[in-house]
Image (spheres, rainbow, N blue to C red):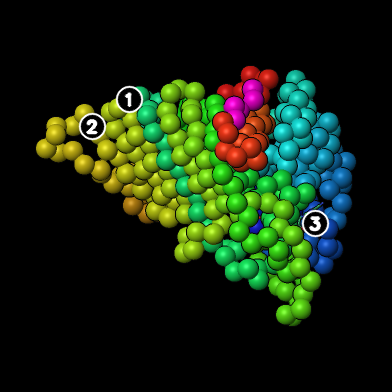
Amino acid sequence: MVGYAFMGAAHSQAWRTVNRVFDLPARARMALICGRDTAKVADAADRLGWDAYTTDWRDLINRDDIDVVDICTPGDSHAEIALAALAAGKHVLCEKPLANTVEEARAMTAAADVARAAGARSMCGFNYRRVPAVTMMRQLVADGRLGVIRHVRATYLQDWIVDPQFPLVWRLQKDRAGSGALGDIGAHIIDLTQYVTGQRISGVSAVTETFVKERPLPAESSGLAATVDGQTAPTGTVTVDDAAVFVARLDGGALATYEASRFATGRKNGLRVEINGSLGSVVFDLERLNELEFYDATRPTAEQGFSRILVTEGEHPYMSAWWPPGHIIGYEHSFTHEMRDFIEAVATGVDPTPSFADALQVQLVLDAVARSAELGSSWAEVAPTLTAAGV
Ligand SMILES: NC(=O)c1ccc[n+]([C@@H]2O[C@H](COP(=O)([O-])OP(=O)(O)OC[C@H]3O[C@@H](n4cnc5c(N)ncnc54)[C@H](O)[C@@H]3O)[C@@H](O)[C@H]2O)c1
């Protein structure tokens, strides 16, 4: 694994747990973790359960006994590490968004296609697909229970940079993060809604805004937290969007709205998706991730209404491996499910999803949103991926 902070910890928890919960054809051994600071990565290896540590990610690539490289770094290093790992025949799991640019994402997808022929698999870490209620949403749509999908309404709202004194961490720098709220949290709802509906965004009209354009430079930063050295800290320019709002057409005929913001005061990690079809509607809210609201318009009129399904039954996706019905799960379980699906695919020689090609398609949507916003919200078509990617 490369990176040991937020996602490094979340993925480590999942790698530690996955074989203890799921019966899988292969076992994960946590061999080597990489970070740039010797003392910090040594501490992380001990705390997170890794056999050894290094300060150079190339050590992972060069070791013959390492089969999988898990990339948990900011977007500016995804392409370089993934390309090297795939060329060395490693299976690669890469955090989202796949890359900082469409060009990098195309190169990674092409490399994944070449590596696949030699048996190396690749996947992008859109973990919310693996929340059981989200997986179930997709099944309801695929089974025709919602009929023809007309509307998709998706919001992903946070508030961690409302304070203008919050420092200029890597997530606020375009060269490190690629984009702001758009690529960080907007990418999640783009992937999630396309996954659930089986439809792809074909075009968008967007507005983006950077509300606070100058921020203090961080003295030290890690993850979402940072500290500033006193009141007189020098400032730097924020080069990404603070919020992105767009309307979209899906290729199956649905109309969609998306809102991704880091300025939604009071909203900590508010991901909500509502889908309306000719036969029913479903609603998912991450703050109540064990639940799904379902409106079945085929029921007798007198009995119609949104019903709350507690997605904890053994027949619900992933849940038979966990606890008795009603014993709820949380955020971290989505990563355990991600590792479960990844190990199973690798061990049985099939391609895990979302593939790099699927993640490239999300990158193309991000690019269309940015282009539209730059051109005063004019309509921007989503470019084709030029590969045979399944959503
Ligand atoms: N799936 C999700 O829900 C989710 C949530 C948060 C972040 N992410 C994604 O995960 C990735 C990492 O984000 P994070 O929140 O964990 O960031 P973070 O700042 O918490 O951690 C980044 C880690 O990468 C390390 N790092 C940076 N450059 C490196 C290099 N060249 N070599 C070795 N290590 C390096 C840092 O030391 C740190 O350990 C990003 O792509 C982000 O978009 C995904």
Residue 239 drawn at (x, y percent):
72, 53
Query: Looking at numbered disc 1 in the image, what kind of residue is underneath it?
Result: Gly
Q: Where's residue 96, x and y in %?
A: 65, 43
Q: In the image, what residue occupies the spot 47% across and 54% down?
A: 270
**Amino acid at pointer 3:** Gly
Residues shaded magenta = 380-384
Magenta segment includes 382: yes
Residue positioned 11% across, 37% down in the render:
302
Q: Quadrant of residue 348?
A: top right
Q: Which residue is mark 1?
A: 147
Query: Marks 1/2: CA distance?
Result: 10 Å
User: Where does the image place residue 391, in percent across and percent down from the top left?
Assistant: 55, 27
- Circle 3 Cα neighbour tier, 10 Å, few/some/many (<14 / 14–19 / ≥20): many
Q: Please tell me whether mark 2 sits on a helix, a strand or a loop.
A: loop
Residue tagged by mark 3?
35
Residue under label 2, please give it: 297
The mark lying in front, picked from 3 and 2, is 2
Residue 229 visible in this rendered orientation of the protein? yes
Is the residue under label 2 in contact with that under label 1 (CB below 8 Å)?
yes
| Figure disc tally | 3
Q: Is residue 318 in sight in this rendering? A: no
Distance between mark 3 and mark 1 Cα atoms: 48 Å
Q: Is residue 125 magenta?
A: no
